[in-house]
Image (cartoon, helix red, strand yellow):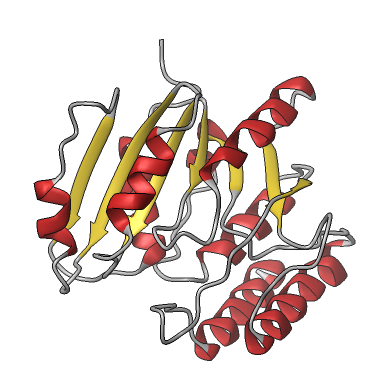
Amino acid sequence: MPPLISVIIPVYNEVNTVAQVLELVNAVDIEKEIIVVDDGSSDGTANKLGSLDYSRFSSIKVIHHSSNMGKGAAILTGLSHAVGEFVVIQDADLEYNPQEYIPLVNYAKANNLAVVYGSRFLGGRCSMARMQYLANRLLTFAVNFLFFTSLTDMETCFKLVKREVLVDLKLKARKFEFESEVTIKLLKKGYKIKEMPVSYKRRSYPGGKKVKWNDGVYSLYTILKLRIF
């Protein structure tokens, strides 16, 4: 039997946090497989991954890109190896709590849903840098305006989607615009995106956060391009 979820972890230069993230994901009491994709890290992450003891992990795959290709590319590599019923993405920077897979999956199963997003803006104040907040609001507004939806957090990392649905989307995005592409293609195929609240502990740019303002610009371009064409 395939696992309930495939947790895809794209990793780029996260030598200080990747081991802790893997421990936290492994500790989640849910049937899962873990797929780590090191996206050409240059800070020792690959060596760190090679030094870990995986004997306590029930199912884990570690894949290495020879060069940095982008978050979307790493996710697509992970998806090509996934066999779970659902897929969820886990960043390697400790901003999201892996224990919250459980309510997302339970909600999806109880309501026969193919898609559930974990929203950082539901159920309380979200701690987010001003520019990141403004970019998120703009991109989410653009999606809501163009598709007559009422999403609160289109840019969330926690997108729980049935694996067969993700594969059918024929995703192509290589970098951070992956979030926009997934959402637009789901909506264009008629899937209803439901949201549940999740917690969020933001990381600063000096602390290693990698998304930049130009990623937001390209994400907006991706939304408009996919909506029109």
93 horizontally vs 22: left or right: right
In the rendered image, the quadrant that contains the C terminus is bottom right
Residue 190, by quadrant, is top right
- Residue drawn at (74%, 30%), measured in percent from left and top? 107
Please provide percent x and percent y for residue 156.
63, 60
Please provide percent x and percent y for residue 134.
72, 85
67 horizontally vs 92: left or right: left
Front-lying residue, 154 or 164: 154
**Can you see residue 188?**
no
Please provide percent x and percent y for residue 165.
57, 37
Front-lying residue, 139 or 167: 139
- Residue drawn at (46%, 51%), measured in percent from left and top? 90
112 horizontally vs 129: left or right: right
Front-lying residue, 74 or 122: 122
- Residue drawn at (56%, 39%), measured in percent from left and top? 99
Please provide percent x and percent y for residue 3.
43, 20
In the rendered image, the quadrant that contains the N terminus is top left
Q: How many marks?
A: 0
Q: Is residue 30 positioned above or below 142 on the image? A: above
**Can you see residue 130?**
yes
184 horizontally vs 164: left or right: right
